[in-house]
Image (cartoon, rainbow, N blue to C red):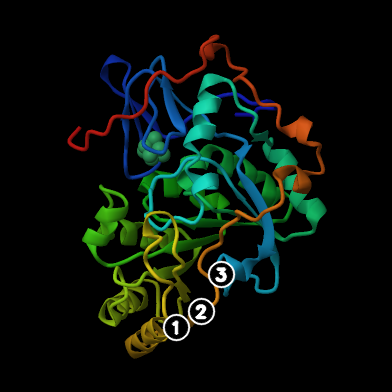
Amino acid sequence: MTAPQQYQLVETRLQEKLANGTTRCNLCLWRCKIGHGQRGFCQAHVNRDGTLYNLSYGILSSIDIDPIEDKPVKHYRPGTQVMSVGSYGCSFRCGGCHNLDISWGVKALDELARGESREAWVPPQSLVDSALRAGVQGIAFTYSEPAVWLEYIIDVAKLAHEAGLYTVYVSNSFVTDEALELAAPHIDVLCSDIKSLSDAFYREICKPARVEQVLHSIKKAQELGIHVETRTNIIPGKNDDPEEHYRIACWVRDNLGKDSPWHITRFFPAYKLSDVPPTPESSLFAARDAAQRAGLTNIYVYNDKGCDCAAENRPVSFYLGASEDEIHEVRKCAASCCGDDGVLLKKYEQNLTD
Ligand code: SF4
């Protein structure tokens, strides 16, 4: 399929047609069952007359340029720079999210669905051209969960590889095997969170997520030939027990290898966890000691950095060499299926037993 040259709904890559015009999205492990006019949990996929479409294809909420080490990735092309991009729609609703405005984007997606959007629309080739102009060596998909945006990521990543750029996928790893298999040939690096080894912790963040599913996806990514690095953001009182860190490190050692990099990052108060203090340095170093006991050889502690939030970024137009008007002109999907009323009828109603 050729990439569209103006904003329009793009068919969701992994969808299953069910009875009565309902569709199942198989991009992430929510596996949302979506009826006509509904959107998935991420808000980015909509069922229109029995077909699922991605609303956020080509819509950029943020761009930044930074060293690959900031992703954090330390063992792939060190010293190079990446253009980091993200869009609206995420499969988690983390209580301590630092990227609310640029990742969840419920308002932005509502406007897209109603055909009233003024968001930045960037065709895949324009993004790759901008990365080349900026002189970076890679493109990183980050800020929200890339699986939700997979249609665009694959189109960009193919062109990026043709242009000699590498690709990085920063993920919560709540993704399906099918999505990973589809993405793997186009992705060079996965930086994945292992938020905790406790199902209760994941339940608090994203109801259906289980530790076992996340770990399975991370291991599978490595088996598919992607360079994998993992990260744990330590939140005081939530996942700061060194015994748990020891078990995470043992899992990394036994499943990814003792030399696989593990990054320990510091939590800073945000959103629903605004009352939780920043991680004390002692917790970060206790986690490092636990990982050393487990035999990991590449442990990185970040005691001055909490997230890769792009809230302070320059506007998207700055990086694209385009005027605000040129890229912020998305109003209505060009596809005839949308009609005059836009595509939104009602939002996803969660039913985990379906
Ligand atoms: S949350 Fe979004 S990406 Fe995940 S299954 Fe549901 S619709 Fe698909």
| Viewer can see residue 299 | yes
Other residues around mark 3 within 10 Å, as few (<14) / some (14–19) / many (≥20): many
Q: Indicate whether 1 appears above or below 147.
A: above
**Between 206 and 337, which is closer to the camera in this rendering?**
206
Q: Which mark is residue 303?
A: 2
Above or below: residue 105 compared with residue 312? above
Residue 10 visible in the current orientation: no
Q: Amino acid at mark 3?
A: Val
300 sits to left or right of 325: left
Mark 2 lies on a secondary structure that is loop
Question: Would residue 156 appear left or right of 34 to someone viewing this image?
Answer: right
In the rendered image, residue 144, in percent from the top left (x then y), is placed at: 50, 49
Whole-percent x, y for residue 318 in the image:
77, 47
Question: Residue sitting at 45 percent across and 20 percent down?
Answer: 344
Between marks 1 and 3, how big is the CA–CA gap?
A: 21 Å
Q: Amino acid at mark 2?
A: Asn
Name the residue rendered at 70%, 56% in the picture.
165
Callout 1 touching callout 2 (CB < 8 Å): yes
Disc 1 or 3, which lies upstream in sequence?
Answer: 3
Q: Which residue, given by chain and number where applicable, does mark 3 sit on?
A: 73
Hey, what amino acid is under mark 1?
Answer: Glu
For ligand 1, the image quadrant comes to top left
Residue 328, picture quadrant: top right
| Residue that mark 1 sits on | 281
* Residue 4 location (% of width, % of height): 65, 27
**How many numbered marks does the figure carry?**
3
Residue 172 position within the rendered picture, expressed as x and y whole percent measured from the top left: 41, 56
Q: Earlier in the sequence, mark 2 or mark 3?
A: 3
Which badge, 1 or 2, comes first in the chain's sequence?
1
Q: Is residue 90 above or below residue 34?
A: below
